[in-house]
């Protein structure tokens, strides 16, 4: 409320000074001003009166009235003033106020004092100070989703979930006296683990022998170009001083690695090192046992391939893991389809007779009519299959056990495998094949539970042979039957099985997976900058092998220890002009498609089992030894032949590390159009 009053005043002029009506000083309220240093304020205890007396004095003169307190009143006053001072200090520190705001913030945690002379001697002081800094942020939320999908039940169309996210960025500096310092950093969004450091640093006086002790994250820089220092070490580091001699010692674990990239002519030069067991598994497959059996002979005189086979058409089908809807079909893949050699089939291994199942056993070329799995015999009833195999739901009943010699019954997952909506691979994008040597290479490795089936055509001496059925080969995807009611059947394709979803090393198709191709990890290789050597490490690496047992009957061929391993394994028989050079020229024969896959950076051996059967025969001194464990090994074969590598899985073969001593080492230059990758 505002009140206004107007009053008429009649004044008389006089010579007296007018008094100012503005109130100042104590009239407005008491103003507290700190006493100057000359005024001493203190409490003095009087033992005679058992009282605390407060007075203010300048020199020896008291300038105020004394205040007398009992001990209880005095201690209560001290307690209240301490509490008030503590909370004011914390409040000012949080608000950033100052008297020097930075100092106030550092004192969020109080300093600790250790009243001990020994403690002060070691650490150069008796204070313990902890200074934390950083921030902690947390996001809490709720996510509610609604999906109006008719295929879902009403209860499953809505979903409620919580969303939590936290970010922590903290650092702590601890000081114990003047000599010991503890530093700790922790950040949840740090790029590398070693950025979250914990370090303890002890620095004594300059006259001590121990100049520094660091525990935690340390480094070891060296002022030398000959030996480079290491970074991101976790351990103990000490600096010692003996007169004019200084010693720096580090005992630690290195948590970083150095990588050197050499660039030449627009590409990077890299090294690779592979053991014999590091073959590229589940990516390369022979199309039939026939191509595997003739592989060594076909490449024995490379760069000329001794093969009369020319594959003209091929289709590859695998498990549809990506739920693709285009180029899909139901398929049935049979392991023994097209195989004519009874010894390399499951039917033959299970007491099937050639006369009862195989047609023309003398002709081992793969073809559909090689045995009674011939798809053309399904409708006639003369084969091992009947019409039920065309429907994915009745595949298992489609195998007629009565047609097999000896009553052999095929097993799903071993003799055959079937896929619903199998995916057809695209040539060039998903796979490539060698038309003369008869194998395919997938661009993506298959998992152990995936199925691989193929159908292909090839010519041999002017005649056309086919294995399996093609998608456009007359077998329609669906068949509509209209009798009493309309029935739509999804017809399956019959394929040659190359890989089943069940791994069985005793099955013949285990040998169809190639184990003589090695991936270097490079792409677009150039011959000028590619170097490769085969070494044997026992214990140091060397590019030759020596006999374990010499003399008659040892099985060691004459002069074998004088040949480098590249020549022993038939990868060095040409010179730089691709002319035959007896004994080789000491360099890897870079032959595209035969010894090297330039585009994908793969090394291809010209032998199916270079470290197994081939090496076994090399150590037979020209005698034709039977590659069978029952025939026995001589001492040299026992030392060098790695039979388990081909007879067992990789995991099982690793149980015999004494045989896994052959190494493939070299360098390559990888060129790219998008610059040089430094990793």
Image (cartoon, helix red, strand yellow):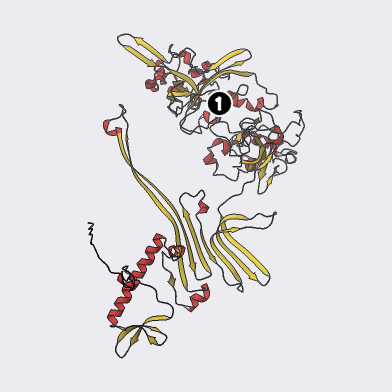
Q: Tell me if mark 1 has few (under 14), some (14-19) or many (20+) residues whose alpha carbon lies within 10 angstroms of its own.
A: some
User: In the rendering, at what x and y percent does residue 202 appear?
Assistant: 54, 67
Which of 35 and 598 lies nearest the eye of the viewer?
Answer: 35
User: In the rendering, at what x and y percent does residue 94 appear?
Assistant: 39, 60
User: In the rendering, at what x and y percent does residue 605 appear?
Assistant: 64, 32
Dot 1 falls on a residue whose secondary structure is strand
Q: Is residue 377 left or right of residue 19?
A: right
Which of 585 and 619 lies nearest the eye of the viewer?
Answer: 585
Q: Is residue 408 visible?
A: no
Quick one: quadrant of the N terminus?
Answer: bottom left
- Residue at the image position 70 percent from the left and 42 percent from the top: 543
Quick one: quadrant of the C terminus?
Answer: top right
Which of 446 and 289 lies nearest the eye of the viewer?
Answer: 446
* Above or below, comparing residue 299 to residue 22 in the picture: above
Residue under pointer 1 = 431
Q: Is residue 656 left or right of residue 559?
A: left
């Amino acid at each position: 409320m505002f009140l206004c009053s107007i009053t008429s005043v009649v004044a008389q002029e006089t010579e007296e000074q007018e008094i100012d009506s503005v109130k100042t000083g104590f009239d407005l309220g008491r103003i507290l001003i700190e006493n100057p240093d000359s005024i001493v304020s203190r409490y003095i205890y009087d033992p005679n009166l058992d009282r605390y007396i407060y007075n203010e004095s300048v020199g020896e003169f008291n300038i105020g009235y004394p205040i007398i307190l009992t001990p209880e009143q005095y201690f209560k006053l001290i307690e209240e003033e301490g509490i008030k001072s503590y909370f004011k200090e914390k409040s000012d520190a949080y608000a950033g106020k100052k008297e020097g705001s930075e100092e106030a913030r550092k004192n969020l945690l109080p300093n600790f004092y250790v009243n001990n002379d020994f403690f002060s001697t070691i650490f150069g002081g008796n204070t313990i100070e902890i200074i934390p800094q950083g921030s902690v942020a947390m996001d809490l939320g709720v996510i509610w989703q609604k999906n109006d999908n008719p295929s879902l039940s009403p209860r499953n169309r809505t979903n409620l979930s919580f969303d939590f996210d936290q970010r922590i960025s903290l650092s702590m500096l601890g000081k114990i006296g003047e000599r010991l310092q503890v530093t700790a950093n922790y950040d949840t969004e740090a790029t590398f683990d070693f950025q979250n450091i914990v370090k303890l640093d002890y620095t004594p006086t300059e006259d001590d022998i121990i100049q520094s002790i660091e525990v935690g994250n340390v480094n070891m820089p060296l002022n030398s170009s000959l030996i480079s220092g290491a970074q991101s070490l976790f351990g103990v580091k000490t600096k010692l001083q003996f007169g004019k001699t200084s010693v720096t010692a580090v005992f630690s674990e290195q948590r970083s690695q150095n990588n050197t990239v050499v660039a030449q002519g627009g590409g990077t030069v890299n090294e690779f090192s592979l053991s014999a067991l590091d073959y590229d598994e589940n990516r390369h497959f022979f199309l039939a046992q026939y191509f595997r059996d003739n592989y060594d002979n076909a490449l024995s005189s490379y760069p000329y391939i001794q093969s009369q086979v020319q594959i003209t058409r091929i289709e590859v089908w695998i498990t549809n893991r990506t739920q693709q809807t285009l180029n899909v079909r139901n398929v049935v893949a049979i392991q023994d389809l097209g195989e004519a050699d009874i010894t390399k089939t499951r039917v033959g291994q299970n007491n099937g007779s050639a006369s009862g199942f195989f047609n023309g056993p003398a002709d081992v070329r793969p073809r559909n009519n090689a045995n009674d799995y011939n798809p053309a015999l399904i409708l006639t009833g003369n084969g091992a299959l009947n019409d039920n195999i065309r429907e994915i739901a009745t595949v298992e009943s489609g195998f007629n056990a009565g047609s097999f010699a000896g009553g052999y019954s095929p097993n799903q997952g071993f003799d055959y495998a079937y896929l619903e909506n199998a995916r057809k691979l695209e040539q060039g994008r998903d796979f490539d094949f060698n038309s003369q040597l008869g194998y395919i290479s997938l661009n993506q490795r298959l998992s152990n539970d995936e199925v691989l089936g193929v159908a292909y055509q090839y010519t041999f001496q002017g005649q056309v042979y086919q294995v399996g059925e093609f998608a456009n080969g007359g077998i329609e995807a669906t068949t509509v039957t209209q009798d009493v009611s309309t029935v739509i059947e999804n017809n399956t394709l019959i394929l040659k099985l190359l890989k089943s979803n069940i791994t069985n090393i005793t099955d013949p198709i285990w040998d169809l997976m190639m184990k003589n191709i090695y991936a270097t990890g490079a792409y677009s290789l150039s011959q000028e900058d590619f170097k490769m050597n085969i070494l044997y490490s026992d214990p140091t690496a060397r590019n030759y092998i020596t006999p374990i047992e010499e003399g008659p009957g040892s099985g060691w061929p004459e002069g074998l220890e004088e040949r480098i391993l590249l020549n022993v394994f038939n990868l060095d028989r040409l010179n730089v002009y691709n002319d035959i050079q007896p004994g080789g020229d000491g360099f890897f024969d870079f032959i595209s498609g035969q010894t090297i896959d330039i585009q994908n950076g793969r090394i291809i051996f010209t032998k199916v089992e270079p470290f197994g059967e081939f090496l076994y025969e090399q150590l037979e001194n020209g005698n034709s030894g039977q590659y069978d464990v029952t025939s026995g090994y001589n001492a040299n074969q026992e030392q060098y032949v790695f039979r388990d590598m081909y007879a067992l899985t990789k995991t099982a073969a690793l149980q015999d590390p004494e045989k896994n001593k052959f190494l493939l080492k070299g360098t390559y230059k990888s060129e790219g159009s998008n610059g040089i990758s430094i990793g």
